[in-house]
Amino acid sequence: MDINMPDMDGFETTQWLKVNHPEVHVLALSMYDNETSIIRMLKCGAKGYILKDSEPAELRTAIDAIINKGFYYSDLVSGKLMHAINKLDDGGDGLKNLVPLNDRETDFLKYACSELTYKEIADKMFVSPRTIDGYRDALFEKLQVKTRVGLVMYAIKNGVVNI
């Protein structure tokens, strides 16, 4: 299951499959390696998660593991989950502050952490400036922030970007 899809994203589709066709086992395939995407996809019902740049052998291993064991967690996924759990143990915000973001919102958030203008972000994402305004406003509401600085602080605090 690709996460970034046009009508229903991979999160919504996986959740729908979990409810309507629980016999279908989903392996997420994404270019995103952040905790938010991984945890959200697993919570939606994915049985495994690998990156698009994985070797064909890992894809085969993941498919075999899901068929035989019912799940596949790569070293990347295990590491990200351990990091999130450790943040909880250390008294950090960890999983409780992870707000589900779709891939386009995550892309926008990463660009918002740069010095690009909103128009330049629109060009990079191949959308209109009005669409960017929609992403920005949706993230303001979802993340309960009021400014671009608030978006950047959220992204740094939750590992969406690293400084």
Image (spheres, helix red, strand yellow):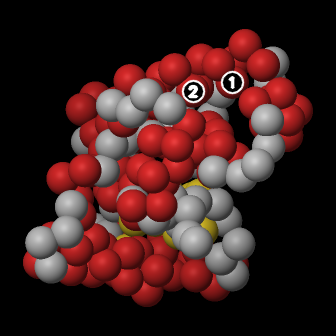
Quadrant location of the C terminus in the rendered image: bottom right
Residues marked 1 and 2 touching at CB (< 8 Å):
yes
Residue pictured at 37% horizontal, 83% vertical: 79
Q: Report if residue 37 is visible in the image.
A: no
The x, y position of residue 134, in whole percent, is: 59, 17
Between residues 25 and 85, which one lies in front from this camera angle? Answer: 85
Residue at 69% x, 81% y is 55
Image coordinates of residue 158 in percent, x first then y, are 39, 60
Q: Position of residue 5 (x, y in %)?
A: 63, 35
Dot 2, crowdedness within 10 Å: few (<14), some or many (≥20)?
Answer: many
Q: Is residue 46 left or right of residue 115?
A: left
**Amino acid, disc 1:** Ile
Image quadrant assignment for residue 53: bottom right
Give 29 or 148, whichever is nearer the viewer: 148
Alpha carbons under labels 1 and 2: distance apart: 6 Å
Residue type, numbered disc 2? Arg
Circle 1 is placed at which residue position? 132
Q: Secondary structure at mark 2?
A: helix
- In the image, 41: left or right of 45? right
Q: Locate residue 90, reporting x and y percent.
A: 15, 79
Q: Which dot marks residue 136? A: 2
Q: How busy is the neighbourhood of tag 1: few (under 14 within 10 Å), some, or many (20 plus)? A: many
Q: Is residue 95 shown above or below 143?
A: below
Q: Which mark is residue 155?
A: none
In this rendering, does residue 48 appear at all?
Answer: yes
